[in-house]
Amino acid sequence: MRRGGRQFEHDSMIRSTTSTLILALAVSTAPMSAAPAAGAVSDPAPTPVAEPEWDRTMDRVALDALVTGEDSAALAVSGSFVGRFGYTPEWQDAMAVAPAGACSSPIPLPDAFRSPCAAHDFGYDLLRAVEPASSKARRELDMRLIDRLGEQCAESSPPTGAHWSCRILVEAISRGLRVNTWRQDGEPPLEESVSDILLSLVRKVVAT
């Protein structure tokens, strides 16, 4: 029996959105903990603690500065932030970054992507620190990452294969970030397994 048009469109949306996320997971910079190697001992995830109101305000000011492009002002985070996430942000390539931040990807990415990804990691940690944070702030951080990655691609000569490969990677990352932020309703990001991500994505699409 032929399904109705509305049901067909709904099923197509689920397949399309799921495929987009699976593609993006290959090159995504979404915050997920890498699985430890066999036999390796991993450090426990930092335990959320209640920040004093002054510290929360200080971190909110830092987040606002990062979102608006005033990265140098974003370096002034609170002691609570340092204690919770285990680092003080550093200045790298004219960006405020998480020192150990990087692009999470099972395939090699250009070295030039590292600093923008580390800046994005720092921004996501600030979102967690000031929770609840506005969904607009998360979207702005995502857009800043994509803009910065695009700038790195622009340094390649357009006719070269490297340039177009770079553009394809950035587009995949952009789609992954948009889907992931939509899936989590723009709230501070969570650490999830791939199965958790796919399950919550299906639930989100079904509920839409």
Image (cartoon, helix red, strand yellow):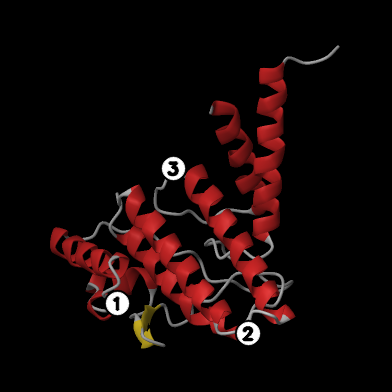
Q: Could you tell me which residue is drawn at 27 percent across and 79 percent down?
A: 75
Choose the circle earlier in sequence order: 3 or 2: 2
Q: Could you tell me which residue is drawn at 27 percent across and 67 percent down?
A: 68
Mark 1 or mark 3, whichever is nearer to me: 1
Tell which of 74 and 131 is nearer to you: 74
Instruction: Tell me residue 124's x, y (percent).
Output: 40, 63
Tell which of 94 and 193 is nearer to you: 94
- Left or right, residue 200 beside residue 182: right
Q: Quadrant of the N terminus?
A: top right
Height in image: 204 above or below 78?
A: above
Q: Distance of mark 1 from mark 3, alpha carbons?
A: 25 Å
Amino acid residing under circle 1: Asp
Instruction: Tell me residue 74's x, y (percent).
Output: 26, 74
Q: Which residue is mark 3?
A: 185
Tell which of 21 and 48 is nearer to you: 21
Q: Which residue is mark 2?
A: 157
Q: Residues within 10 Å of mark 2 (few under 14, many from 20)?
A: few
Instruction: Tell me residue 100's x, y (percent).
Output: 48, 80
Question: For numbered disc 3, what is the local secondary structure?
Answer: loop
